[in-house]
Image: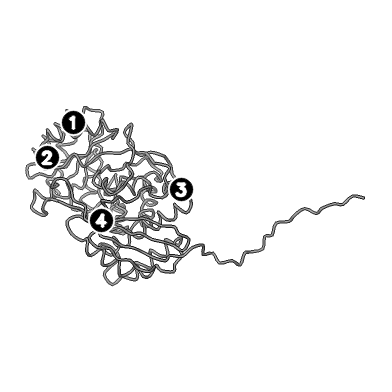
Amino acid sequence: MTTSTAPTVPDTRPSRAAAVVDRITGVTLSSVTLPLANPISDAKVFTGRQKPMTEVVVLVAEIRTESGLEGFGFGYSKRAGGPAQLAHAVEVAPELIGEDPSDIARLWTKLVWAGASVGRSGASTQAVAAIDVALWDLKAKRAGLPLAKLLGAHRDSVRCYDTSGGFLHETIEQVCDNATRTLEAGIGALKIKVGLPDTAEDVRRVTALREHVGPDVPLMVDANQQWDRARAVRAVRALEPLDLVWVEEPLDAYDAEGHADLARTFDTPIASGEMLTSVAEHLELVRHRAVDVIQPDAPRIGGITQFLKLATVAEQHHLTLAPHFAMEIHLHLAAAYAHEPWVEHFDWFAPLFHEELETSGGRMHLSDRPGLGVTPTDRLRAWTTRSVTVGA
């Protein structure tokens, strides 16, 4: 006698279990004052609009959950705004307690509307950005993946250029020395600040750097919004023979029409976007075809959730993506962009994190560390001026 066993049929009935897999129990928000080794000057200092920069104030968000996971995020402000960002973040953070940290888009909207009376751009959304970055860091850690891999990376390394060695407070001889060290460190391109009162001096400095590094090193310039339309035309025309990758912020950041005129007139690509604080503001640049290179800053426009929205639009318009500053965040976002992007190398945040980002062959490389892949140092804790915990 033989006995037959019926095949096992999988149970395809819908599960009635709750979709929530974890809940937020606590959020710690901290303001960290990062001192800079030397006062930093760009064109805004030489036009009298700002004083030299001596520090960066970093807003840190650390999120904890019932399951014991922790997410780490940060934003920043330069010269002013740090206390405002912290105050706003502390006000809206209670909205997170008890929520599922995986529902990032919904939580972004909830936090923004909790503080919508002061607007949905600027300091309010910059405060939310640090929290948003921490939520994405946590989500990637839950998956055991680097953030770029969670988002769907197109590449494991990104072209990178250095800015921190090209400021106007240094002589062109110092800038050239900095450039040599930068290239030896495996960073593939250089950006130098322009926008001095004497445009001829700008051209002299850029020409000297081009002669120093040779014709094959990609070179960018940044006027930090300090030219008017007529002067920008003259300056870009004078710089065109130097074969620049782009001219950045030649005009006021909100002058989309002026940028569009430059983009139509010259072969040298026009770049802008770092000073805008919402996706809507960037869409004006796209609508006017004002830039060839778009430069959003995730901490400034509301975090990774908003950055991804803008990246989709930029991809559809075949724009080059070159996120501003905060390379610890932007390396991941650039790696997930469809068209070959750039990442800006700034070494200012190095004292805050144990990990260093690897550069070689002109590119910045992803690591296998989950999330953002950074952990805070004792110096970050020592430079913390105020810390507030909401929840457990």
Tag 4: residue type? Val
Image coordinates for residue 339, horizontal then vertical, percent: 38, 42
In the rendering, which numbered label is found on residue 145?
A: 3
Residue occupied by mark 1: 210
Question: Which comes sooner in the sequence, label 2 or label 4?
Answer: 4
- Label 3, label 2: how far apart the Cα atoms are: 41 Å
Q: Estimate how packed mark 3 is, as few (under 14), some (14 to 19) or many (20 or more) residues with alpha carbons within 10 Å.
A: many
CB under 8 Å between discs 4 and 1:
no
Q: Residue at x 28, y 34 (%)?
A: 188
Tag 3: residue type? Leu
Residue 275 sits in which quadrant? bottom left
| Of 342 and 361, the residue lying toward us | 361
Q: Residue at x 16, y 36 (%)?
A: 239
Q: Residue at x 34, y 55 (%)?
A: 73
CB under 8 Å between discs 2 and 4:
no
Callout 1: helix, strand or loop?
A: helix
Q: Estimate how packed mark 4 is, as few (under 14), some (14 to 19) or many (20 or more) residues with alpha carbons within 10 Å.
A: many
Q: Residue at x 20, y 33 (%)?
A: 179
Residue occupied by mark 2: 170
How did the renderer colour the structure?
Answer: one colour
Question: Which comes sooner in the sequence, label 1 or label 2?
Answer: 2
